[in-house]
Image (cartoon, rainbow, N blue to C red):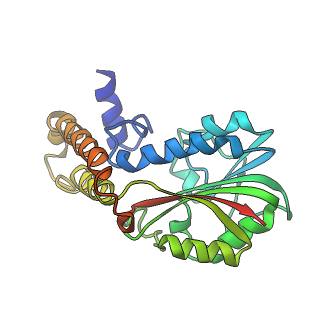
Amino acid sequence: MKIVQELYAYYNKKEKAIKKTVFHPAYAEIRHAVKRCKENAYLAKGILLDLGCGTMPYKDIFNPKVERYIAFDYPVVQETLPDFEKPDVCGNSLYLPFVNDSFDTILCFSVIEHIPDPFQMISEISRVMKKGAILILTGPGIACQVHGAPYDYVRLTEYGYSYLFEKCGLKIEKTYYCGYLLASMAKLFNTFIIKYPYKGRAYKKVFQIIFLPLTFLLIAMVNLFAIVADKIFMAKEYCPFYFFVARKE
C-alpha cells in the first residue's frame, strides 16, 4: 500500500518518493548519477555550493564530506517546491552573489539546460571557485527530451561541454555517460505514457485509480530492460545525460 501511495504522490508532483527507484520514468538514467555521486563524493571538501539545488537529492551523499553545505536556487523554482527543504541563498546563477574564490566544491545537477546563457553561468561558477576546486556537473545530451518548458534552452555534446569548460578555465577530469541508447528510449517512452495519454481527459481520476499502478509497473519493466540492453548497445552518441568532474586550474 505504501508504494502505491508513493506512486500517486509522484504523479501528483507532491513528493520525490520514487526518484531513486525503478518506478521512476528516468531511473535508467538517474541510477548512473547516484552511482557516480557516491563514487566521487570523496572529492568534496571545504565549503560546498549546491547550485540550482532544487530538492537537494544528493545532499545526503555530499554533506558528510564537507565543512559547510550551502544550497542555492532560483527563487521562482523554489516557489514550486513548498514541501521541501529551503535553500540557504536564492538568486540568479548568471550573477552569483558570492565573492571570488569562495568555494572548494560546487555541485550543479540538471541546471545548465535551463539557463539561457550557459557560458555566463560556467564563467560565474569558475569565478567563485578556489584554485584547485572541484565542479561536479550533470547536463543533457542531444538525446534528452524537452523538460521544464518553456525554460529549456540548451543541448550539448560532450565535446561542447569540454569546449565550454576549457573557455572558463576548468579542466574536465572525468566524463561519465548516464546511460546510452536504451536509457534514452526508456526515458522518452516512460515520460510519454505517464504524462500524455490521459492528459486533460474527463476520466483522468478513473485512470489514476485503476491504471496508474499498472503504468508504473510497465515503467519498471521498461527500465529493467533498458538497464540490461544498455550494457550490450553502448552507443554513447545517444547518451541522455552526462556527468562531469572538473577542476579549476
The answer to whether one can see residue 207 in this image is yes
Residue at left 50%, top 42%?
Answer: 34
The answer to whether residue 56 of the structure is visible from this angle is no
Which residue sits at x=47%, y=73%? 157
- Residue 51 in which image quadrant: bottom right
How far across and how far down the image is residue 24, in percent?
A: 34, 42
Left or right, 75 with respect to 177, comes to: right
Front residue (pair 16, 230):
230
The image position of residue 231, as x and y in percent, is 32, 49
Q: Where does residue 88 sit, x and y in percent of width and height? A: 72, 46
Q: Quadrant of the N terminus?
A: top left
On-image quarter of the C terminus: bottom right
How many circles with numbers are drawn on the protein?
0
Instruction: Using the rendered view, name the quadrant where residue 93 is placed.
Output: bottom right
In front of the other: 94 or 229 = 229
Q: Residue at x 46, y 69 (%)?
A: 152
Outermost residue to the front: 232
Position of 82 with respect to 194 (left or right) is right
Q: Residue furthest top?
A: 1
Instruction: Residue at 51%, 67% (x, y): give it.
Output: 113
Residue 206: image location, x then y, percent: 14, 39
With respect to residue 97, does 81 lie above or below? Answer: above
Instruction: Determine the image quadrant of residue 215.
Output: top left
